[in-house]
Amino acid sequence: MTEMTFFRYFPAKEHLLLDDPYDPQLSAAVADQPRDLPPFLRAARGIREAWRALPEPETPIIRRRVRIIARTPALRGAMWRTTGNTERALAGQLVADGASPEVARVAAASVLAALVAGLYLWADDERVTLADAIERALDVIETRA
């Protein structure tokens, strides 16, 4: 592949490493949570349920990508920009289900911060599965709700 062809597909290095195909599954899982739960718990439990349903990624490659992102300030910023799209999707679902925009946004942002922290911890610890890292990160915030 030539350099020109490569950059046609990946205009910036962040596009090569960042991929976020899970927004529809995450939003659907939040929508499936009981509406009588507070938005924060709906978001946390929805994320937890969605991650439980997803297959464990091809660990060495994905773990290496996440490790590179976690250790590169510019890529961490790009990760948060990508996460912003997910935050808007989750907050939108919570608002559609009756939460106020302010509460929905804080709930979505908090849960996603835990999710990203879990990803970064997983990237640095070869002994833990991604599912376990996500579960532990969500446990921290869900038990504080």
Image (spheres, rainbow, N blue to C red):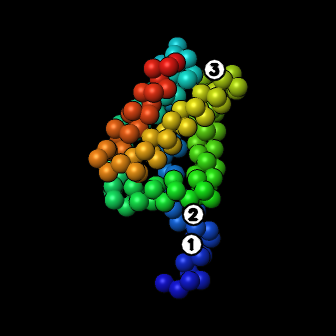
Q: Is residue 18 left or right of residue 125?
A: right
Q: Amino acid at mark 2?
A: His
Of helix, strand and loop, which one carries label 1?
helix
Of helix, strand and loop, which one carries label 3?
loop
What residue is at 60 percent from the left and 56 percent from the top? 73
Q: Quadrant of residue 91?
A: top right
Q: Which mark is residue 98?
A: 3
**Residue identifier under label 2:** 15
Of helix, strand and loop, which one carries label 2?
helix
User: Are there few (<14), some (14-19), or many (20+) residues within 10 Å of tag 2?
Assistant: few
Q: Are marks 3 and 1 in contact (CB under 8 Å)?
A: no
Q: Position of residue 140 (x, y in %)?
A: 45, 27
Q: Earlier in the sequence, mark 2 or mark 1?
A: 1
**Residue identifier under label 1:** 9
Q: Are marks 2 and 1 in contact (CB under 8 Å)?
A: yes
Q: Earlier in the sequence, mark 3 or mark 1?
A: 1
